[in-house]
Amino acid sequence: MINSLNAVVSRQEKPRVVEIIGPAGAGKTTLFRALGGYPDLIQLRKYPNIHRTTDSPFFIRYALPLLPSLFRLYHRPSRYLSQREFAWMTILNGWSYVLQKEIKRCRQVIFMDQGPVYLLAEMREFGPEFLKNKKAEKFWQEIYCRWADTLDLIVWLDAEDIDLMERIQTRAKEHVVKHEPEPIVLDFLESFRKTYEYVVSTLGSCTGGPRVLRVDTSQYRSQEIVDLLFIELGLS
């Protein structure tokens, strides 16, 4: 369990693209909203939404080139991708190119909540079997390394299990384990951490992979985390 804030950010190489990750109840949304109070310094981003008209050009541009690769990898009896999963794969395939262009035009640090690490973890945990076998390894390696070249820093929020359970159960927001007994919630959190450890370590194994800032939100409030981030990002 994380028990301190461990910064590994070099002030000589200021991160430009940052993702906030962590289990339910860790404080991602709270931190994301707090960072929104500094629009001159920070740009908040969500991944492209397939149901949003303004994002249609993105999906047209990057979905079609993805189809041949997916068809080559597909095999029975695995199920195929759902519509949501295909949208996620399109985002993983093309969004890095968009962000790399944007950081050349803007001076702000781009912060993402539910960005590529989240999507990679979801696809690894819940995606169809044909994307988890040996034949798909090269396909995934290219995606991981492309994102490792784009993503500079991962801010990993976590907390003690007892704190996470209390937050999940007492907040208004619904969650799949909100009304489940304690053993199921603990299993969910453990599975979550294992999947994210895999994704983060795989990104880190690529040349120039992102650095990781781990924060125990049982010990730090959101504004304290913002202040520490500003110091580490050279924004203060």
Image (tube, rainbow, N blue to C red):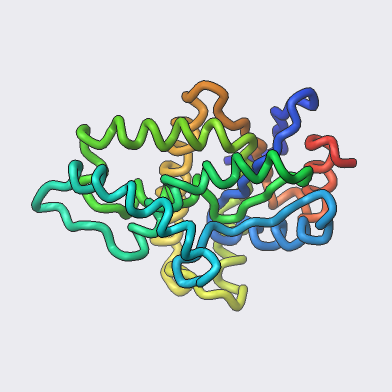
Q: Residue at x 31, y 35 (%)?
A: 139
Q: Quadrant of residue 79?
A: bottom left
Q: Residue at x 21, y 57 (%)?
A: 80
Left or right of 211: which side holds 232?
A: right
Left or right of 187: which side holds 33?
A: right
On the rendered image, what quadrant is the N terminus found in?
Answer: top right
Q: Residue at x 69, y 56 (%)?
A: 44
Left or right of 29: which side holds 48?
A: left
Q: Position of residue 84 (x, y in %)?
A: 36, 64
On the rendered image, what quadrant is the C terminus found in?
Answer: top right
Q: Position of residue 36 (x, y in %)?
A: 77, 60
Image position of 195 with respect to 163: above or below? above
Q: Residue at x 54, y 60 (%)?
A: 24
Between residues 26 and 41, which one lies in front from this camera angle?
Answer: 41
Q: Position of residue 105 (x, y in %)?
A: 72, 43
How many numbered marks, from 0 up? 0
Image position of 154 with respect to 53: above or below? above
